[in-house]
Each structure stands twice: as structure tokens, then as C-alpha cells.
Image: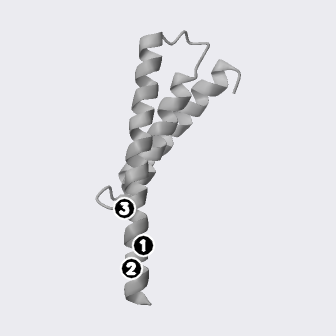
């Protein structure tokens, strides 16, 4: 994704996917929250990496900070989803 146009398109595609997932996933469930958080992180990371757009350093820093927060949220939500899956498997076993 060295070219700015590709990076912009990738960010737009990811943002569209994120919007669709937000409409179809239950955020009350840990796995749904993890899916959304991962996509939020991806959108922000790709936008932060857009070099040709002269993204101001302050804005780039904020995008990276938001991506980091989303990755943290995804990690926690995925941990909860894994714990729930293990508990469910034990009950059904």
C-alpha cells in the first residue's frame, strides 16, 4: 500500500465493513465487541499510515492512540469470549 490512493481505498473499504458489522453484530456479546474493536483498530491504523495526505502529526498520533485503545478493547473482549466458550464447552461436555 505504498500509494496513497490504495491506502485511502483500503480505509474506506474497512470503514464500510465496520459499518456493516456494527449493524449486524450484537455488541452485548464479547465476541461481537471484539469484532468491532478489531475493525476500528484497522481503520485507524490504515488512516494513520496514509503518507500522501499530509496527515498532521497530531492527527496521526490521535489515530494511533485510538487504534491502540481499540486493540486493548479487542484483547479484553476476546478474552471474555474465550472464557465463555470454555465454560460453555464444559457444560455441554
Q: In which quarter of the image is residue 4?
A: top right
Q: Which quarter of the figure is the N terminus placed in?
A: top right
| Residue at numbered disc 1 | 85
The residue identified by callout 3 is: 80
For residue 19, say whether it is visible: no
Residue 23, position in %: x, y?
A: 37, 51
Q: Residues within 10 Å of mark 2 (few under 14, many from 20)?
A: few
Q: Work out whether residue 17 or residue 55 is closer to the camera in this orientation and state it.
A: 55
Q: Nearer the viewer, residue 79 or 42?
A: 79
Circles 2, 1 touching at the beta carbon (< 8 Å): yes
Q: In which quarter of the image is residue 46?
A: top right
Query: What residue is pinned by disc 2?
Result: 88
Helix or strand or loop: what does disc 2 sit on? Answer: helix
Left or right, 9 with respect to 34, comes to right
Q: Distance between the residues labelled 3 and 2?
A: 12 Å
Q: Which mark is residue 14?
A: none
For image coordinates 42% across by 49% down, the residue present is 74
Residue at x-position 43% and y-position 81%: 89
Q: Position of residue 2 (x, y in %)?
A: 71, 22
| Secondary structure beneath label 1 | helix
- Binning the other alpha carbons within 10 Å of mark 1 as few (below 14), some (14 to 19) or many (20 upward) gives few
Task: Work out whether 79 lies above or below 36.
Answer: below
Tell me: residue 73, above or below residue 67. Answer: below
**Any part of residue 57 in sight:** yes
Contact, mark 1 vs mark 3 (Cβ under 8 Å): no
Q: How many marks?
A: 3
Expressed as whole percent of the image width and height from the top left, the position of residue 32 reads: 39, 57
Q: Which residue lies furthest to the right in this view?
A: 2
Amino acid at each position: 500500500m505504498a500509494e496513497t490512493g490504495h491506502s485511502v481505498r483500503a480505509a474506506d473499504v474497512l470503514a464500510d465493513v465496520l459499518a456493516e458489522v456494527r449493524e449486524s453484530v450484537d455488541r452485548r456479546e464479547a465476541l461481537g465487541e471484539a469484532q468491532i474493536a478489531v475493525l476500528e483498530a484497522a481503520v485507524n491504523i490504515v488512516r494513520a499510515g496514509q503518507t500522501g495526505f499530509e496527515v498532521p502529526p497530531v492527527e496521526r498520533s490521535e489515530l494511533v492512540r485510538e487504534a491502540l485503545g481499540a486493540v486493548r478493547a479487542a484483547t479484553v473482549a476476546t478474552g471474555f469470549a474465550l472464557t465463555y466458550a470454555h465454560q460453555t464447552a464444559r457444560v455441554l461436555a
